[in-house]
Image (spheres, grey):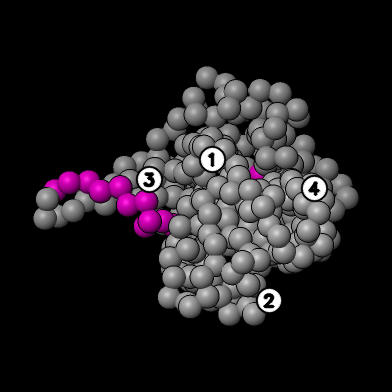
Amino acid sequence: MKLNIKETETMILKLIKNQYWLDCRASFDALVSLFDECQNSDELKLITELINRFEYTNEQDFFNFYREEAKRIAEDTSLLPDQCIIGPTKDDLRPDSSQAVTRPFYRYLLPYKKKLTVCNNFKYIENFICKANKKKINVVLLDDFIGTGRTMICRMKKCDKIVKENKTIEECKYQIIALAAMERGKTIIENTGASVYTRHILRRGISDNYNGLELRRAKTNMRRLESLFLNNPTTHEYSFGFQQSEALYVKIEREFTDISTREKIFLTQKTVLFLLPTVYYSSLMFPTRPTSGLIRYKRTAPIHIDRAAMPNAKM
């Protein structure tokens, strides 16, 4: 849908009022391309409404949340050092964001006298439960984002299986800590009896914001837009977000230049986080695989459109 420059600028300025992180040339160019992909006013309206639902948080909020949670855990008298283990959901050798959360969480626990066990892989949690000789144990699982909740459910089921094999353990309690969580995923986890601690609770981008005919039209429009980037979007695992979560979590890491040495430094801890309750993960908007959690972004360079990075993307 071709818009004239004045119409485009007006729409983008309205978006920037609510989403100030869009106020840069790279975002402007990406939005123009995105609007051009829309065939009609309904698609354009859907895209702008989804973008307006983006929730933004910065690195200070990120670290403050896990610092506060570490303090809460350290002061929880029910969590005894020999009956509690803390760790990520990751259970193989490939690094992921849950391990990136675990590292600062461990550092925040160090000042406290109570020395709790913190591991960097879920396999250690399984081993801890297997060898436990206490009647009650506590498992604290860390992550940055809860989508459908299936990953956490899967990990808790694994723990429960080992608990049953261990004849000593009578009770295993779970605490789940994540910066952001989809409302439905959080509810699913809580229904198992686990406690979920999070800062941001998000609703599904489309299904939780429309009803009746409007909902059906919104889904139809989104599937049409998805078809531009995904082969067979109705059966693709990333259609409407991973496992139909209608959500996208993106972590943007920025490159800075050290003026004294003129060298570019990639600061993995200097992160800006975007929590996006939307199903739109067009490569025009974000140049990496959906839900991959990492975008390399340079302040002075426009967003690089890398469709090859999209799974099964059309070239």
Which residue of the protein is positioned furthest toward the left in this rendering?
Answer: 260
Disc 4 versus disc 3: distance between alpha carbons?
48 Å
Task: Name which residue lies at 49% across and 29% down.
Answer: 309
Mark 4 or mark 3: which is in front?
4
Mark 4 or mark 1: which is in front?
4
Q: Amino acid at mark 2?
A: Ser
* Mark 3, residue position: 297
Is 82 in front, or is 270? Answer: 82
Q: Are marks 2 and 1 in contact (CB under 8 Å)?
A: no
- On residue 292, the disc is 1
* Mark 2, residue position: 78
Disc 4 versus disc 2: distance between alpha carbons?
24 Å
Q: Position of residue 155 (x, y in %)?
A: 70, 48
Q: Are marks 4 and 3 in contact (CB under 8 Å)?
A: no
* Mark 4, residue position: 165
Q: Closer to the N terminus: mark 4 or mark 2?
A: 2
**Quadrant housing residue 200:** bottom right
Q: Is residue 254 magenta?
A: no
Residue range corresponding to the magenta coloring: 262-279
Is 47 in front, or is 94? Answer: 94
Task: Name which residue lies at 49% across and 25% down.
Answer: 308
Q: Position of residue 8 (x, y in %)?
A: 50, 48
The kind of secondary structure element at disc 2 is loop
